[in-house]
Amino acid sequence: MELPKRKPTRLKGYDYSTPGMYFITICTHNKKWLLSNIVVGEGLCTLPQNTLTPIGNEIERAIQYIDNNYDGVKIDKYVIMPNHIHLIVILDNSGGYGNPPLQNVIGQLKSYTTNKFGNTLWQRSFHDHIIRGEKDYQKIWEYIDTNVIRWEKDCFYNN
Protein backbone atom coordinates (compact mmCIF):
# COMPACT_ATOMS: atom_id res chain seq x y z
CA MET A 1 0.00 0.00 0.00
CA GLU A 2 1.42 3.35 -1.01
CA LEU A 3 1.34 6.02 1.67
CA PRO A 4 0.06 9.49 0.75
CA LYS A 5 2.74 12.08 0.03
CA ARG A 6 3.01 14.79 2.66
CA LYS A 7 3.75 18.40 1.85
CA PRO A 8 7.00 19.68 3.35
CA THR A 9 6.16 21.47 6.58
CA ARG A 10 9.26 23.65 6.90
CA LEU A 11 10.52 26.49 4.75
CA LYS A 12 13.18 24.95 2.52
CA GLY A 13 16.68 26.08 3.42
CA TYR A 14 15.62 28.12 6.47
CA ASP A 15 17.60 27.71 9.71
CA TYR A 16 14.98 27.25 12.43
CA SER A 17 17.51 28.04 15.15
CA THR A 18 17.78 31.61 13.81
CA PRO A 19 16.72 34.27 16.30
CA GLY A 20 13.17 35.32 15.53
CA MET A 21 9.50 34.87 16.36
CA TYR A 22 7.50 31.86 15.27
CA PHE A 23 3.76 31.12 15.32
CA ILE A 24 3.20 27.43 16.03
CA THR A 25 0.05 25.29 15.81
CA ILE A 26 0.05 21.71 17.10
CA CYS A 27 -3.05 19.53 16.63
CA THR A 28 -4.12 16.47 18.57
CA HIS A 29 -4.23 13.13 16.77
CA ASN A 30 -7.37 13.02 14.59
CA LYS A 31 -8.20 16.43 16.10
CA LYS A 32 -9.77 14.77 19.15
CA TRP A 33 -11.03 17.12 21.85
CA LEU A 34 -8.62 16.17 24.63
CA LEU A 35 -7.01 19.36 25.91
CA SER A 36 -9.84 21.61 27.12
CA ASN A 37 -13.58 22.13 27.16
CA ILE A 38 -15.09 25.37 25.93
CA VAL A 39 -18.57 26.24 27.14
CA VAL A 40 -20.09 28.90 24.91
CA GLY A 41 -22.44 31.50 26.34
CA GLU A 42 -24.17 29.71 29.22
CA GLY A 43 -25.68 31.40 32.26
CA LEU A 44 -24.88 34.99 33.15
CA CYS A 45 -21.53 34.88 31.42
CA THR A 46 -21.92 35.15 27.66
CA LEU A 47 -18.18 34.87 26.99
CA PRO A 48 -16.92 31.35 26.30
CA GLN A 49 -15.17 29.68 29.22
CA ASN A 50 -12.13 27.51 28.44
CA THR A 51 -11.42 24.86 31.09
CA LEU A 52 -8.32 22.72 30.71
CA THR A 53 -8.55 18.95 31.08
CA PRO A 54 -5.88 17.08 33.07
CA ILE A 55 -3.99 16.63 29.79
CA GLY A 56 -4.35 20.36 29.04
CA ASN A 57 -3.07 21.23 32.52
CA GLU A 58 0.03 19.09 31.97
CA ILE A 59 0.60 20.69 28.57
CA GLU A 60 0.39 24.11 30.19
CA ARG A 61 3.00 23.02 32.77
CA ALA A 62 5.24 21.77 29.94
CA ILE A 63 4.88 25.09 28.08
CA GLN A 64 5.76 27.01 31.24
CA TYR A 65 8.71 24.69 31.86
CA ILE A 66 10.11 25.42 28.40
CA ASP A 67 9.59 29.16 28.93
CA ASN A 68 11.39 29.10 32.28
CA ASN A 69 14.18 26.60 31.57
CA TYR A 70 15.32 26.80 27.95
CA ASP A 71 18.02 29.41 27.43
CA GLY A 72 17.22 31.58 24.43
CA VAL A 73 13.62 30.34 24.17
CA LYS A 74 10.58 32.33 25.29
CA ILE A 75 6.94 31.30 24.94
CA ASP A 76 5.48 34.77 24.48
CA LYS A 77 1.80 33.85 24.08
CA TYR A 78 -0.19 30.63 23.92
CA VAL A 79 -3.68 29.18 24.05
CA ILE A 80 -4.72 25.60 24.67
CA MET A 81 -7.86 24.76 22.75
CA PRO A 82 -9.85 21.48 22.83
CA ASN A 83 -7.91 19.89 19.95
CA HIS A 84 -4.93 22.13 19.26
CA ILE A 85 -2.55 24.64 20.77
CA HIS A 86 -1.15 27.89 19.40
CA LEU A 87 2.11 29.40 20.59
CA ILE A 88 4.32 32.35 19.80
CA VAL A 89 7.87 31.11 20.35
CA ILE A 90 10.74 33.60 20.43
CA LEU A 91 14.31 32.43 19.87
CA ASP A 92 16.68 35.18 21.00
CA ASN A 93 20.22 33.78 21.49
CA SER A 94 20.21 34.87 25.14
CA GLY A 95 21.66 31.51 26.18
CA GLY A 96 25.05 32.37 24.69
CA TYR A 97 25.42 29.07 22.83
CA GLY A 98 22.93 29.63 20.04
CA ASN A 99 19.33 28.51 20.02
CA PRO A 100 18.03 24.98 19.92
CA PRO A 101 16.25 24.41 16.61
CA LEU A 102 12.54 25.17 16.84
CA GLN A 103 11.63 21.61 15.89
CA ASN A 104 13.63 20.34 18.90
CA VAL A 105 11.74 22.64 21.28
CA ILE A 106 8.36 21.53 19.91
CA GLY A 107 9.58 17.93 19.78
CA GLN A 108 10.42 18.06 23.50
CA LEU A 109 6.95 19.39 24.32
CA LYS A 110 5.26 16.71 22.24
CA SER A 111 7.55 13.93 23.47
CA TYR A 112 7.06 14.75 27.16
CA THR A 113 3.27 14.88 26.91
CA THR A 114 3.10 11.81 24.65
CA ASN A 115 5.15 9.77 27.12
CA LYS A 116 2.83 10.88 29.91
CA PHE A 117 -0.50 10.33 28.10
CA GLY A 118 0.05 7.88 25.27
CA ASN A 119 1.34 7.62 21.75
CA THR A 120 -1.78 8.90 20.00
CA LEU A 121 -1.86 12.33 21.63
CA TRP A 122 -0.47 14.46 18.78
CA GLN A 123 -0.81 14.68 15.04
CA ARG A 124 2.48 14.21 13.21
CA SER A 125 4.60 17.37 12.86
CA PHE A 126 3.29 20.90 13.48
CA HIS A 127 2.49 24.05 11.54
CA ASP A 128 4.84 27.00 11.77
CA HIS A 129 4.81 30.55 10.48
CA ILE A 130 7.85 32.80 10.69
CA ILE A 131 6.57 36.09 12.12
CA ARG A 132 7.70 38.94 9.90
CA GLY A 133 7.51 42.24 11.69
CA GLU A 134 5.40 44.02 14.28
CA LYS A 135 2.18 44.08 12.24
CA ASP A 136 2.33 40.32 11.66
CA TYR A 137 3.12 39.78 15.36
CA GLN A 138 0.14 41.91 16.51
CA LYS A 139 -2.23 40.08 14.15
CA ILE A 140 -1.11 36.69 15.46
CA TRP A 141 -1.18 37.86 19.11
CA GLU A 142 -4.79 38.98 18.64
CA TYR A 143 -5.68 35.72 16.87
CA ILE A 144 -4.37 33.70 19.83
CA ASP A 145 -5.98 36.06 22.34
CA THR A 146 -9.43 35.76 20.74
CA ASN A 147 -9.27 32.09 19.70
CA VAL A 148 -11.57 30.91 22.52
CA ILE A 149 -14.18 33.58 21.68
CA ARG A 150 -14.24 32.42 18.04
CA TRP A 151 -14.20 28.70 18.86
CA GLU A 152 -17.45 27.74 17.12
CA LYS A 153 -16.18 29.39 13.90
CA ASP A 154 -12.66 27.91 14.19
CA CYS A 155 -11.46 25.65 11.38
CA PHE A 156 -10.58 23.03 14.03
CA TYR A 157 -14.10 23.04 15.49
CA ASN A 158 -15.61 19.77 14.33
CA ASN A 159 -18.79 19.21 16.27
Image (cartoon, rainbow, N blue to C red):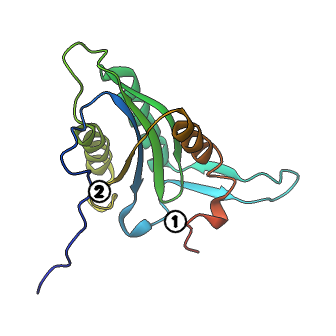
* Residue at (21, 38) in percent of width and height: 15
Q: Residue at x 52, y 41 (%)?
A: 136
Q: Is residue 33 left or right of residue 118?
A: right
Q: Amino acid at mark 2?
A: Gly
Mark 1 lies on a secondary structure that is loop
| Residue 45 percent location from the top left of the image | 83, 50
The quadrant the N terminus occupies is bottom left
Can you identify the residue that label 1 sits on?
A: 156
Determine whether, in the image, residue 26 is placed left or right of residue 13: right
Please count the marks in the image: 2
Residue type highlighted by circle 1: Phe
- In the rendered view, tell whether residue 72 sits above or below residue 63: above
Q: Which residue is mark 2?
A: 118
Give the quarter of the image for residue 105.
top left
Q: Nearer the viewer, residue 56 or 54?
A: 56
Percent coordinates x, y for residue 7 in the rendering: 25, 66
Residue 57: percent from left, percent from top = 49, 42
Residue 140: x %, y % from top left: 54, 44
- Does residue 81 lie above or below 141 as drawn? below
Q: For the residue labelled by badge 2, is the local secondary structure a helix, a strand or a loop?
A: loop
Residue at x 32% of width, y 61% of height: 123
Against 155, is 148 above or below? above
Q: Which mark is residue 121?
A: none
Q: Alpha-carbon neighbours of circle 1 within 10 Å: few (<14), some, or many (≥20)?
A: some
User: In the current view of this chain or complex, which residue is farthest to the bottom?
Assistant: 1
**Horizontal placement of 27 versus 112: left or right?**
right
| Displayed quadrant of residue 20 | top left
**Quadrant of res 127:** bottom left
Q: Nearer the viewer, mark 2 or mark 1?
A: 1
- Classify mark 2: residues with Cα within 10 Å, few (<14), some (14-19) or many (20+): few
Mark nearer the N terminus (2 vs 1): 2
| 137 is higher (above) or lower (below) than 29 | above
